[in-house]
Image: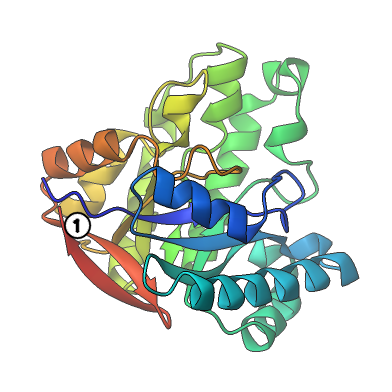
């Protein structure tokens, strides 16, 4: 198995829930044997304000400076985790023009008019989980139809909390029809997916999305797939890449991707 590691989902101190500078992340990456990574700091489109604008501006500046400082040791790329673009398409389009970068993850952290799953408690799910997940995947499908991003982020994100934290077992077969249609659409639009291995570090205990979704994307003809630790500190960059690569090989992939200037570069597994 190729030992080259490119981590396509890393957050710096320019995300509200992360703590380390880009320089510290570079030092952590080298220590962890990582060859390169993309800084994909949070941008929740429906909440866009001056703080987000300043954070992304600084994120990209920090990456450019670090890329020069570590140019002989690491490949470092600018990125954004752009969440909920359909909840304010005009702003999403403006962001794409204002912040050209190497890589954009299209994510969903919340359903329209609902709080982020990150902030929900068990009681928020107990009587509404089917309603929330149905709306979630319907909006995700529409987001892929819009498709102005590079990969779909952590497709089963809500399970981090519902199954991981609150131990509520979900029958995902209810949502597979729309998820599979979303994956077919992604293949047709040349949009990739990510395998997010952060779940291995959490109570959830596995990757996002489920293996059946990774395999389905491959079976539908998809080839563009990134691996991301979703690291929020310098210690976990590149963590659980071995598990991620093994899952991709099992699903039939021969490559995973890194991105530069919004174009995928294939890396042999």
Q: Residue at x 47, y 65 (%)?
A: 144
**Quarter of the view holding residue 22:** bottom right
* Quadrant in which the N terminus appears: top left
Q: Nearer the viewer, residue 197 or 144?
A: 197
Q: Residue at x 42, y 27 (%)?
A: 200
Q: Nearer the viewer, residue 215 or 253?
A: 253
Q: Judge left or right: residue 183 versus residue 130.
A: left
Determine whether 146 is above or below 115 in the image.
Answer: below
Where is residue 207? Give x, y as percent.
38, 33
Where is residue 82? Give x, y as percent.
62, 63
Crowding near the residue tagged with mark 1, few <14, some 14–19, many ≥20 C-alpha atoms within 10 Å: some
Where is residue 140? Give x, y as percent.
53, 54
Where is residue 265? Give x, y as percent.
26, 73
Label 1 element class: loop
Q: Nearer the viewer, residue 142 or 263?
A: 263
Q: Judge left or right: residue 191 versus residue 217.
A: right
**Quarter of the view holding residue 220:** bottom left
Q: Judge left or right: residue 153 versus residue 121.
A: left
Q: Residue at x 52, y 28 (%)?
A: 159
Which residue in the structure is indicated by mark 1?
Answer: 220
Q: Judge left or right: residue 223 versus residue 93.
A: left
Q: Residue at x 71, y 84 (%)?
A: 94
**Quarter of the view holding residue 65:** bottom right
């Amino acid at each position: 198995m190729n030992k080259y590691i490119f981590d396509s989902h890393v957050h710096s101190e320019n995300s509200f829930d992360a703590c380390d500078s880009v320089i510290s992340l570079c030092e952590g990456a080298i220590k962890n044997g990582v060859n390169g990574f993309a800084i994909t700091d949070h941008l929740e489109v429906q909440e866009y304000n001056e703080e987000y604008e300043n954070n992304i501006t600084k994120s990209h500046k920090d990456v450019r400076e670090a890329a020069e400082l570590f140019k002989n040791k690491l490949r470092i790329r600018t990125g954004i985790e752009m969440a909920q673009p359909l909840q304010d398409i005009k702003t999403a389009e403006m962001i794409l023009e204002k912040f050209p970068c190497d890589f954009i993850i299209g994510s969903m952290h919340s359903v329209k008019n609902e709080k982020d799953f990150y902030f929900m408690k068990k009681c928020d799910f107990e009587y509404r989980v089917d309603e929330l997940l149905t709306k979630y995947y319907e909006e995700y499908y529409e987001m892929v139809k819009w498709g102005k991003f590079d990969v779909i982020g952590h497709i089963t994100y809500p399970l981090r909390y519902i199954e991981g934290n609150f131990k509520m077992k979900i029958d995902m077969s209810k949502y597979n029809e729309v998820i599979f249609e979303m994956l077919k659409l992604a293949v047709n639009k040349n949009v990739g997916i990510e395998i997010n291995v952060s779940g291995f570090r959490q109570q959830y205990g596995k990757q996002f999305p489920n293996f059946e979704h990774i395999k389905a994307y491959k079976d539908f003809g998809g080839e563009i797939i990134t691996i991301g630790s979703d690291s929020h500190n310098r210690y976990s960059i590149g963590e659980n890449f071995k598990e991620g690569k093994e899952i991709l090989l099992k699903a039939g992939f021969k490559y995973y991707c890194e991105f530069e200037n919004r174009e995928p570069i294939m890396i042999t597994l």
